[in-house]
Image (cartoon, rainbow, N blue to C red):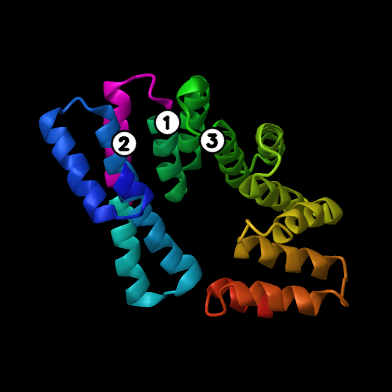
Amino acid sequence: KDYLTRLQLTAARKEAQRAVQYDNQNAEAFLVLGLVDFLEAQNNHRLLEVDDCLTGVDAEGLRNEMVAHVRAAIGNFAKAAGIDAEYSEAIANQAKAHALLEEYDVAIELLEKSLEIPHRLMQLGLTRADLGWARFNSGDDAGAAKELRQALQSNANMCIAKYRLGRVYFKREEWNKALEQFQAVVLEDDCRMQEAHLYFVKTMSQLSMTNELPAAIDQCSALAPKSCIAAQCQGV
């Protein structure tokens, strides 16, 4: 777990595998193995969608690798939950892995199950925010907004929940509400979310805030100048 917190994934995998060899009913070890594969998958996803904007044969190979990591993660999270039926953290992580594959109905079911055992969740508010995001991606805007507002009640400073609630408002063309959420993320120094900057720029454009727009576009691009999102900001 210490290696995992330092993102030394190879070392984390090796130690978790040793733990399983000593005790194949070690639910926590299977959780760590799942998290290693999930983080590997997230790295691939970021290369595909954000950093390198890969296409064609390069994207196909990386996407296949990402899916393999996600499936392995799902298997290990399921093993952890199978050993300890109340291990809601494992169930919540299994849901996040399904969401990465855009299997949102499965993710919603698992997240709801995990929230029935809140005392075993590491971050209750984040799990609720994940449920809200899964509902949003499945087309349930009202359900998404409800979950995200509840997440913010438990942690008013949660950047990811503010961004996701902003996306709900943006989709429903509630521009002023969307602007408020995105602006809260953009102005927070600890919230370095280029995606929030992109939607902040898009919302400003919808509101015809032409005087403020150039500075916002520059700020968005400066976070990661070579990323796909920077290019999208420049194109607004």
Residue named by callout 3: 127
Q: Give the range drawn in magenta.
A: 70-89
Residue visible at 11% across and 34% down? 21
Whichever of labels 1 and 3 marks the residue nearer the N terminus, that label is 1
Q: Are marks 2 and 1 in contact (CB under 8 Å)?
A: yes
Q: Do the residues labelled 1 and 3 touch (CB within 8 Å)?
A: no
How packed mark 3 is, by other alpha carbons closer than 10 Å (few <14, some 14-19, many 20 or more), is many
Residue named by callout 2: 31
Whichever of labels 2 and 3 marks the residue nearer the N terminus, that label is 2
Q: Are marks 2 and 3 in contact (CB under 8 Å)?
A: no
Q: Nearer the viewer, residue 177 or 4?
A: 4
What's the distance in space between the residues labelled 2 and 3, CA to CA? Answer: 16 Å
Q: Which of 189 and 126 is in front in this view?
A: 189
Specify the quadrant of the image occupied by residue 18: top left
Q: Is residue 94 something that shows in the picture?
A: yes
Work out whether 234 lies above or below 64.
Answer: below
Residue visible at 70% across and 79% down? 218
Q: Where is residue 31 in the image (x, y as percent from the top left)?
A: 31, 36
Specify the quadrant of the image occupied by residue 127: top right
Q: Position of residue 221 (x, y in %)?
A: 63, 76
Residue named by callout 1: 89
- What SS does tag 3 mark? helix
Q: Which of 4 and 173 is in front in this view?
A: 4
71 is within the stretch colored magenta: yes
Q: Where is residue 201 in the image (x, y as percent from the top left)?
A: 74, 69
